Amino acid sequence: MNVRHWSVSIAVLLSIIFLGGAALLVNGCSNPEPIPPVGAGNNSGAPSDPKSPTKPDPQQIRKEALELQRDAKWCDALAKWQELQKYFGNPPDLQLRAEAEVNQKLADSRCKPPRELTDSFSVPPLTDRPEAVPEPQFKDFYTPGRTIRSVAYLNIKGEGSNTRWIFKQDSQFAYRYRVVAETKVTANKDNRITFEQHFPEIVQLLAVSEEKLELHEPDAPILGMVWEQLEKNVLNSVPIYVWLRRAGDIATSGDPKLQGTLTTFWQALRNRGKIPNANADVQFIAELDQFTGARLQFEYANGSGVTHIKVLQGPKYDPDDLQRIAYGSSLLADYFVSQAADKNVGDTARLRARDVSGMFSFGYDCEIDPKSHLDVKRAADTQFAGQPVRALEVTGGDVSVQARLAGSRRTARFVPLSGTIEYSPSQLLVQRAKLKWEGNADHVSENHLLFGTENVTNVAVDSYYEAEVVK
């Protein structure tokens, strides 16, 4: 796509997504050389002295550190990662060092958090409050017990260079940010709704190659497959960063809770029409968000938005993170889309981007500017999964995404080029939304998978959302 404004580095483009998280890196180098334990060899040819002390095996230290981290023993894990720094080898194992540095940072942030963490937070009111919903619709759309499952992802592909990648020259990259959620209405009384939201997975995925990469856009519904996969591999709210040696190791040597996710991502990639070979030079990265596995309770006041958030399952969080996920929850998106879908064919409407932000998942660590919007036009009815739906054509708009870093506010700007939103009047539900975007950003996040990417060209951005009523 023609991207007119990409003069900044791609640190820029994709720092819109949350700070923190867990990462898994898979290096696709063919036939990698094994890393011998430090001290295991004897280059002089002389026999080993059985009385000399044996140097620790860095792979054993790594294994112990990861186990401590998975058990959320952050301070003990921090000590192990610090110990590992002494045994990277000479010359140092750069991959092991990179893995240790990121995990040490994660463990340090949990062992010694910069501010007091909490599991209950009163959300400051927004200055641009959402429109109040008429009482009949407020009750009809959000009846107690109503449960919706959804999957949303943002895709970005392009070409650039990054010192973190295994390739020294410009490379092709394909990035996906995916959110899988289950949202249940537990109470609706006196113009207040209580929502319970569970996140089986929030993850960043990245593939890098010297060959062209594409991400396959689904034609058929995918939510059932995604949910079944995650039910088999329930993920914890524990960020862990692991670097494997090649794509073929995903199925055998990776974190078992991420194997399915990475395998699905690998299968979604297209390299000149074919799935990359397991031994091809393709580097894979996955980073779990800290809210993966969490179950949160939202109190929503009609005409005000989310007023309180409580952690029902998961660790305590930084209050700023809870505030951002509350502001980005767009819990009443189905109602706001229905107001445009109920118009006559050919009529136009404007949607506040903040009210429907869950459909394009720019990330829970950022805030959408209150002036951001999507322009839509009522199109002819169509079908989704064999059922009639009302279609909205996305004809324009402007979405500015803001985040803070080191006290400054950075802004990313996205303009929709085309798209459709499909709404089911019988289920009172947005069943699918697909959009293509043009982006321009000056936005930095050092924990983002594409942080530090430079010389970016041929960038294409698209988003996908799908939902279904399960109760």
Image (spheres, rainbow, N blue to C red):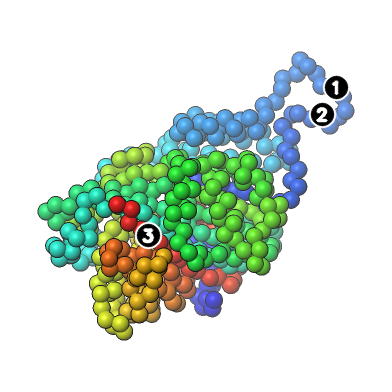
Spatial CA distance of label 2 from label 3 is 60 Å
Across and down, in percent, residue 78 comes to 51, 33
**Label whose residue precedes the other's in the sequence (1 or 2):** 2
Q: Which quadrant holds residue 404?
A: bottom left
* Residue placed under numbered mark 2 in the picture: 42
Q: Secondary structure at mark 3?
A: strand
Looking at the picture, does residue 316 appear above or below residue 414? above
Going 31% across and 84% down the picture, which residue do you hit? 346
Q: CA distance from mark 1 to mark 2?
A: 8 Å
Q: Quadrant of residue 465?
A: bottom left
Earlier residue among tags 2 and 3: 2
Query: Would you name the residue on which mark 1 appears?
Result: 47
Q: Are marks 1 and 2 in contact (CB under 8 Å)?
A: yes
Q: Is residue 394 left or right of residue 76?
A: left
Label 3 sits on what residue type? Ala
**Nearest the camera: 356 or 19?**
356
Q: Which residue is mark 3?
A: 467
